[in-house]
Image (cartoon, rainbow, N blue to C red):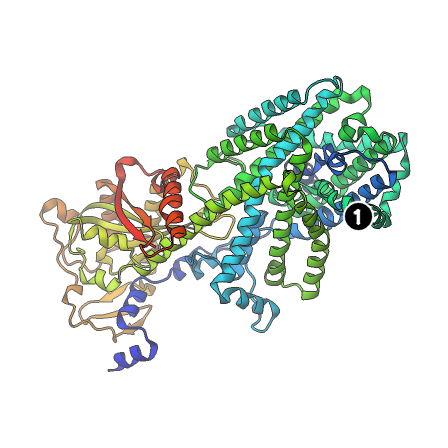
Amino acid sequence: MDSATRDEGTGRGMMWELDQNLDQPMDEEAGRLRNMYREKKFSAMLLLRLAYQSLGVVFGDLGTSPLYVFYNIFPNGVEDDEDIIGALSLIIYSLTLIPLLKYVFVVLRANDNGQGGTFALYSLLCRHAKINTIPNQHRTDEELTTYSRQTHEVNSLAAKVKRWLEAHAYKKNALLFVVLIGTCMAIGDGILTPAISVLSASGGIREENPKMSNNVVVVVAVIILIGLFCMQHYGTDKVGWLFAPVVLLWFILIGSVGALNIWRYNSSALKAFNPVHIYRYFKRGKYTSWTSLGGIMLCITGTEALYADLCHFPVLAIQIAFTMVVFPCLLLAYTGQACYIISHKNHVEDAFYRSIPDQIYWPAFVIATAAAVVASQATISATYSIIKQALALGCFPRVKVVHTSKKFLGQIYIPDINWVLMVLCIAVTAGFKNQSQIGNAYGTAVVVVMLVTTFLMVPVMLLVWRSHWILVLIFTTLSLLVELPYFSAIIFKIDQGGWVPLVIAVAFMLIMYVWHYCTVKRYEFEMHSKVSMAWILGLGPSLGLVRVPGIGFVYTELASGVPHIFSHFITNLPAIHSVVVFVCVKYLPVYTVPPDERFLVKRIGPKNFHMFRCVARYGYKDLHKKDDNFEKLLLDSLLSFVRLDSMMEGYSDSEYSVADMTMTNNGTNMSGLSYTSHDSIVPAQSPLRGTNAGLFMESGQTSQTVGDEIEFLNRCKDAGVVHILGNTIVRARRDSSILKKFAVDYVYAFLRRICRENSVMFYVPHESLLNVGQIYYI
């Protein structure tokens, strides 16, 4: 009666409690793995060396902007000196407000243990609020050393924002949609940066031969681009040491040439440091001045790449490099070009190369081309990183990811994406043939990514940093004060090339949204159809089947509970392995999971059932490498757990007293759980007969010593290991709309066919693979 009353009061029955106590959360196992995380400290000399190295990785894109900015501001030429001064004033203060103040001193601090970009911001938010659309997170994940988070007082502003975000599913979906927009535009940036940088640098070959056709420049640019993308599979590890000196030489070149031009030509351009010329520029030009913002904002392209390519450089090293080298050299370069254009107004189209002294022209051309290649390489690498992060969070189809460096975790190569980027980049370069239209497209992608970063920084500042709302308001206002005018100017250039990143973004958005939607629905289907532990216990230790020698790894997306695919398997086959391990591979909103904290193992049911659960946890930067031997790691984790479990025997939650049909959990007697009508729960004699079978299953065994169980597991391992994967087919329900049927039955089905299988992702031997087919209707 007491038990019945308790069930009515809580609305949860006896079977629910049985499931909870036989398939416990992994708090204890996670707690054993906890260790302290300490932030690295860098000496002054090491910081200077890292600041030097960051030049080649972080600032290449931003540094090559002087190649094409003034031509995109004045594509039809310029007549008034005041227009040049006004445009230069906008460049100076745009560089000051966005790259210097917003990114270098504010946004870079919002990194996820050194990882930047929109997904890094999203992962920070996912750790501080329950906004992940795939609800497979557990409190044990928060015990990871890389899972840093803040706690909030109940009535604080941060707590209110957290509750507001978690209140409704549409808010979580809207936030994810914003992140995907920024991601898709960043991918477009990875296509357009090589196109405009290499094309602008290649234009220098026309200076010695003005009659040369523009088609020759395009062909040279295309050849360089093909070579660049074909070399990607080698990675940047072998040639990366060249990047920093090349970019440093580039900044010295543009800075010294700019200073020389200020001295040689009309120095009236120095008046641009007075911001009043911005007001006069807009007052005089109005519409033309407003639309020219699309060209001016190209001076800050590469700023978002600066954040995405943060990699393993400390923020202080980035700040030193930008304030001491990049920012002064860019100011000198733009001011020197403005001085040259004031004296040579008909040279605005190729002002950069014409302003270079003849004595150093060809060395400057070589350095410019090399810098453009380095800038393109950095953006391409950032695109790979973005795709990898999207893949880890269930927002992109499974593609092959190759680790190109043994030293650096972030250096990866994605073959499929590489060739897509190459084709699109060549199409843009050969299709437009000029910097102006590519610049319009480039500007659209960059300003949208900046707006997304601004909007994501608001909850990050409130939740993660717990900043005062006035500081958040000041940051948002100043950012939007610059970015919204640029965005409005870009709108006027949609028909002049600005449509390109929009088309690219829509295509990738369709792929990512459909994949994520179907992934979430698949997970929800598995959650709702998982098997009750009472049903498993009712089958007895033999599970109602013949327990054959060997270990069966059953892969599932569930971190708790028995998946429906297992019941489908045992109801259609007469035998199951002596040891069954449910393997869940899940990604967490952290950049990496330390190897010694990757696997969590738990026993399911009584010991003589020989059923376990193993959760393999990965961060969005972690890779499954071929030499990892995933199967061996699983087996080693299982054996380690058995040893550890025997040491914690007195504290285990897997103690069973079958004689009186009660269960003891962590020392608490749960006598209310009686099963007088379920005789099959009593450990039954194993159906395995004969000498060989006796080696693998002891009849009526209710307890084992650690040595016996480890010996038993080793014999099972020697008998053979089988990986059981669900080969599921996802279909839309018959009553679904036409749009949903098209997305699920055609788009998602096509993506599933062309993406990699889980067996390939984890390098499962083909001879050890068993696929179990099922159809899910969502």
**Residue 295 position within the rendered picture, expressed as x and y whole percent measured from the top left:** 72, 40
Residue 519 seen in the figure: no
Relative to 528, is 389 on the left or the right? right
**Residue at disc 1, secondary structure:** loop
Categorize mark 1 by other alpha carbons within 10 Å: few (<14), some (14-19), many (20+): few
**Residue with the most extreme left position:** 690
**How far from the left and from the top, in percent, is residue 456?**
60, 55
Q: Nearer the viewer, residue 600 or 293?
A: 293
Q: Amino acid at mark 1?
A: Lys
> How many numbered marks, from 0 up?
1
At x 79% / y 37%, what residue is drawn? 334
Q: Residue at x 55, y 58 (%)?
A: 125
- Looking at the rendered image, the quarter that the N terminus falls into is bottom left
User: Measuring 16% from the left and 72% from the top, which residue is drawn there?
Assistant: 676
Relative to 723, say whether 155 is above or below.
below
In the visual, does 34 lie left or right of 276? left
Q: Is residue 536 visible?
A: yes
Going 62% across and 52% down the picture, which residue do you hit? 453
Image spot of residue 406 (x, y percent) = 50, 34
In this figure, which residue is indicated by the disc labeled 1? 286
Residue 259 lies, in percent from the top left, at 84, 33
Q: From this view, report whether residue 321 is shown above or below residue 108.
A: above
Q: Nearer the viewer, residue 557 or 679?
A: 557
